[in-house]
Amino acid sequence: MRYAVIGTGAIGGYYGAKLARSGQEVHFLLHRDYDYVVEHGLRVDSCDGGFLLPEVHAWQTTADMPQADVVIVGLKSVNNELLDTLLPPLLKPDTLVLLIQNGIGLEYDLQQRFPQVWLAAGLAFICSAKTEPGVINHQFYGHINIGNYSCPDASRMAALIAEFQAAGVRATEVEYHEARWKKAVWNMPFNGMTVALNTSTDRLLAHPATMALIRSQMMEVIGAAQALGVRGLDASFADKMIRNTLDMVPYSPSMKLDYDFHRPMEIYYLYTRPIAEAAKVGFEMPRLQMLESELLFLK
């Protein structure tokens, strides 16, 4: 299939580069590092073995890009209003848009603006950062869960999974709502807490008090998901996320990097929206509401 990547950063750039390396036709939208990538290529420094794409289909505007079978959106959700302009040139009647973004309610909101577009959620379990032009630093993990939101073509979803797997990415199709809330179990505690306490994931889990707080926040997310009818989430998943994080290298999540580099933080879809969705069914999230308030003060 032909792919387009909107948001060639730590996540979109990583998965797009893996697909391109495996032989897929991948077109990358680039801004500040466009000239660098055209001249030097796109490099992935990876714990699984680094590589360089010396020649890249690089573009500065989607108006010049070819239509795609799959559009990978790796933009931060604070920039989603740009999709009103960026998406239309890439779309065919059967284009699948894969939102690899953090938060709750993303697909619903985008579907309201593009009622005919096929949408899927990409939940990336990866430690990756882009801190210099044209270079992606992949530190740990890398698998992706993909949840079908509105794609009517099962074969398209199957092809997407197969091509990710052929590119060396562990990809699995999962139930949409379960996937979004499972990712929130990790994202809501760790993203905000690393900002509020100016720390990293390993230090949060090294202290008994903050480890206990992280777990209690995870249980609030799990409780909200259960109240909303999501299956497959219980306390054992919180324990699994903590074990997985303990196995990781010391890590600063995306929100911490955004805060450190004075970029807007993704507070709405990561905190405000899931807290509001839970409140609709009578479930309160007091610890995460407090964290949201702290982040709103810091932004």
Image (cartoon, rainbow, N blue to C red):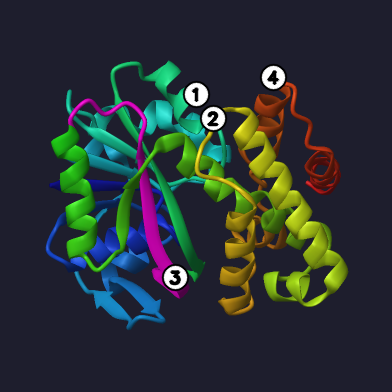
Measuring from the top left, give residue 166's x and y in whole percent.
17, 63
**Disc assigned to residue 280:** 4
Q: Amino acid at mark 3?
A: Tyr
The 10 Å Cα crowd at callout 3, few under 14, some 14 to 19, many 20 or more, is some
The span shown in magenta is 134-153
Rendered image quadrant of residue 296: top right
**Element type at marker 3?**
strand
Relative depth, front residue between 204 and 266: 204
Taking the image as shown, residue 128 lies to the left or right of residue 193, namely left
* Residue receiving disc 1: 109
Q: Amino acid at mark 1?
A: Asp
User: Which of the two marks, 2 or 4, is nearer to us in this view?
Assistant: 4
Relative depth, front residue between 117 and 9: 117
**Magenta-colored stretch includes residue 259:** no
Taking 269 as reference, is 40 above or below it?
A: below
Q: CA distance from mark 3 to mark 4?
A: 35 Å
**Element type at marker 4?**
helix
Q: Is residue 74 visible?
A: yes
Q: Amino acid at mark 2?
A: Gly
User: What residue appears at the point 54 percent right and 49 percent down from the top-left corner?
Assistant: 183
Relative depth, front residue between 166 and 228: 228
**Element type at marker 2?**
loop
